[in-house]
Image (cartoon, grey):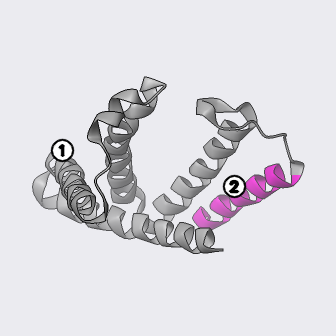
Amino acid sequence: MIGFFIALLSGALMSVQGVFNTQVTKTTGMWVSNGWVQLSAFAVCLIAWFIAGRDNIGTIAKVEPKYVLLGGVIGAGITWTVIKSMEQLGPAKAALLIVVSQLIVAYVIELLGLFGVEKEPLEWRKVIGMIIAIVGVAIFQWK
């Protein structure tokens, strides 16, 4: 149950962060804003590392497969795409499309067993749920 609430908090934080980052970009520009986001996140992680426990930094070299270390690079891309989509669509439409995209891609990752995730069988109720979500996007955008 705690995972449910953490996921809700994550979605809320992502929406607020997207709005904040878009506002910062209006003054600073895209890459200054994006750099600030990544740098400030690094600072928070460094402080948390000092407070919460000191895992060995060297273990990062042992991570396999190596391509999973690209999460930070992907994070910069996420920040850029969230800022651009919120700037062009507004926070609500952008967040809705982002969430539906996350849902579809995450389900495909599960279905195909990509990136070390355990492969799951196709469940039609989940496909129907995604179709309903896509219809919801269309209704949300309909004028």
Check disc 2 and give the amino acid type.
Ile
On whether residue 142 falls in the magenta region, the answer is yes
Front residue of this view, candidates 81 and 71 = 71
Q: Overall secondary structure of the magenta stretch?
A: helix
Screen quadrant of the N terminus: bottom right
Rendering coords of residue 103 (x, y %): 64, 51
Span colored in magenta: 125-143
Q: Are marks 1 and 2 in contact (CB under 8 Å)?
A: no
Check disc 1 and give the amino acid type.
Trp
The residue under the point 39% across, 33% down is 69
Q: Is residue 23 left or right of residue 71?
A: left
Rendering coords of residue 130 (x, y %): 74, 53
Q: Which residue is mark 2?
A: 134
Front residue of this view, candidates 59 and 66 = 59
Q: Secondary structure at mark 2?
A: helix
On whether residue 123 falls in the magenta region, the answer is no
Q: Nearer the viewer, mark 1 or mark 2?
A: 1
Q: Which mark is residue 31?
A: 1
Screen quadrant of the C terminus: bottom right
Q: Secondary structure at mark 1?
A: helix
Of callouts 1 and 2, which one flags the residue occurring earlier in the amino acid sequence? 1
- Furthest residue to the right? 124
Front residue of this view, candidates 122 and 137 = 122
The residue under the point 48% across, 25% down is 65
- Is residue 46 positioned above or below 6 on the image? above
The residue under the point 38% across, 53% down is 82
Rendering coords of residue 52 (x, y %): 31, 64
